Amino acid sequence: MKFDFSGRLQAAFGFVAATTATRLAQKAFGDVVKKSDLNVDVYVMSREATFDEVTLYSGSETYHFAYRSMAEQYSEVFATPPMLSLKRAKKLVITPIDNSDIEVVERYGTEPYEITWRGLLIDMENHEFPIDKMEALNRIFEASREWMVSSEILQKVGVLALYIRDIQIDFVEGFEDTIAYTMTTRAIRPVELQLDTN
């Protein structure tokens, strides 16, 4: 039995970069790889995207976007972990000087990070349509609140909480056991932190 990770990523996201991420296959699907002759080549879409285990939590709800070994311990786990891309901009107040190509920057501000998540939901056990995970993703999106986030990458840039701006769910042609999702989130300061600093 061959399990084509690179084919799923290419079918889901439209292109495959030259960088090979065998680390995902080894960590996420290590048990499966050892028990069969699976093809474990995984290709990362972009050099700017990085795999990271992420946990979203709010009140009593917790969702893990993590590797397969963690998925066996918790029911609300989305394996594999997402590929994260971070984008940020500055807010500038710029005044042009008449009859000149010179601009004066009067005020600087920094916008919060916009974080794009790209991932696959794969039913590795029964190879059926992962409807339960799609329903859970929809619940996460429909929750009208901020989510606290635990992630090594996001903590390095000071992101502790976020809200979800939009989500896209795509059905992957040729792979009925796979759903591709893309979420756009935006960093936000937790309410508790805002109260502490005022």
Image (cartoon, rainbow, N blue to C red):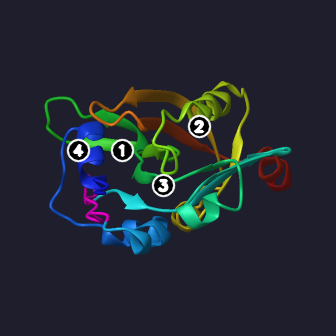
Residue drawn at x 34%, y 56% is 49
Q: Is residue 143 above or below residue 86?
A: above
**Quick one: 157 or 42, which is closer to the camera?**
42
- The image shows residue 23 at horizontal and vertical percentages of 37, 72
Residue plotted at (48% across, 55% down): 80
Q: Pointer 1 and pointer 3: residues touching (CB < 8 Å)?
A: no
- Helix, strand or loop at label 2? It is helix
Task: From the image, tell me which residue sits under label 4.
Answer: 10
Residue 44 located within the stretch drawn in magenta: yes
Q: Closer to us: mark 1 or mark 3?
A: 3
Give the Cα separation between the discs numbered 3 and 2. 12 Å
Q: Percent from the top left, x then y, of residue 101? A: 14, 38
Q: Is residue 4 left or right of residue 70?
A: left
What label does residue 133 carry, if any?
2
Q: Which residues are magenta?
A: 38-47
Relative placement, left or right, of 169 versus 66 is left
Q: In the visual, does 183 lie left or right of 46?
A: right
Q: Are marks 3 and 4 in contact (CB under 8 Å)?
A: no
Q: Which mark is residue 80?
A: 3
CA gap, disc 1 and disc 3: 44 Å
Q: Determine which quarter of the picture holds residue 156.
A: bottom right
Sequence order check, earlier mark of 1 and 2: 1
Question: What residue sits 29% from the left and 45% below the top?
Answer: 8
Q: Main secondary structure of the magenta part?
A: loop
Earlier sequence position, callout 2 versus callout 4: 4
Judging by the rendered image, the residue that carries numbered circle 1 is 105
Q: Residues within 10 Å of mark 2 (few under 14, many from 20)?
A: some
Please, what is the three-letter code of the amino acid marked with disc 3? Thr
Q: Which residue type carries mark 4?
A: Gln
Report whether residue 67 is seen: no
Camera-nearest residue between 134 and 128: 128
What is the distance, in whole Å, between disc 3 and disc 4 at their CAs? 15 Å
